Image (spheres, helix red, strand yellow):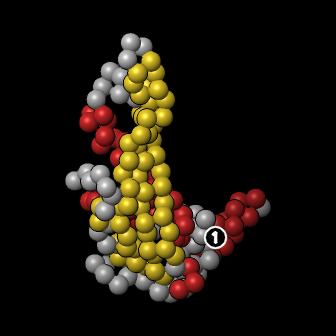
Amino acid sequence: MRKRGYILLFAMLMLLNACGIYSFTGGSISAGMKTVSVSLFENNAPLVVPILSQSFTEALKDRIRTQTSLSFLRTNGDADFQGRITDYNIQPVAIQGDQQVSAGLNRLTITVQVKYTNTIEPDKSFEQSFTRFRDFSTQGSAFASQEQALIKDINAQLTEDIYNRAFANW
């Protein structure tokens, strides 16, 4: 009897998923949405890092690719992401003073301006800035040796925020 209840529950979830009412990824992609396009996010930050534009754009595409079954188009997808990187900033957040004053802890901050267009449900479209940061220490290692890992971590946080805003209505 209990087994039949689980089978019925599973069948209902599959039906709701097929109708676009429920999603196993935690998202609520608009019913009828089949395609997505992600334009290259230009780096307009005052401090330009050559790899940032491409790595952020690819991270966003990967997030969408792994979390949805949407097909990618170059332009004019049912869901369309455009934007630019507006800030890449390194600031000290903890000062230490031995024989000379230096930053004991630094913060890398990245801000991305996103324009999301939902052609299926236009009221879910938005234009918003997203900012994330990571703290790091340069004691024992130079920033350059940590930079790519920090960018990767921040990109993961940013793309999660953007994905949730676009598809999970958070």
Camera-nearest residue between 136 and 74:
136
Question: Quick one: 126 or 104, which is closer to the camera?
Answer: 104
Quarter the N terminus occupies? bottom right
Q: Nearer the viewer, residue 104 or 23?
A: 104
Q: Position of residue 119 (x, y in %)?
A: 47, 86
10 Å crowding of disc 1: few (<14), some (14-19), many (20+): some
Q: Residue furthest left?
A: 50
Q: Residue at x 66, y 73 (%)?
A: 12
The location of residue 3, given as percent across then percent down, is 71, 59
Point 31% across, 62% down: residue: 44
Front-most of 126 and 33?
A: 126
Residue 45 in the image, given as x and y percentages of width and height: 33, 58
User: Badge 1 is on which residue?
Assistant: 13
- The answer to whether residue 57 is above or below residue 33 is above
Residue 55 visible in the displayed image: no
Q: Residue at x 47, y 51 (%)?
A: 132
Above or below — where is 164 with respect to 138?
below
The single residue placed furthest to the top in the displayed view is 99
* Dot 1: element: helix
Q: Quadrant of the C terminus?
A: bottom right
Residue pushed farthest right?
1
Relative to 59, 6 lies left or right:
right
Please report the residue visible at 35 percent of the width from the left and 76 percent of the height from the top: 37
Is 108 drawn above or below residue 136 in the view shown?
Answer: below
Q: Residue furthest front?
A: 100
Amino acid type at circle 1 is: Leu
Q: Can residue 19 be seen here?
A: yes
Residue 73, image x, y percentages: 31, 79
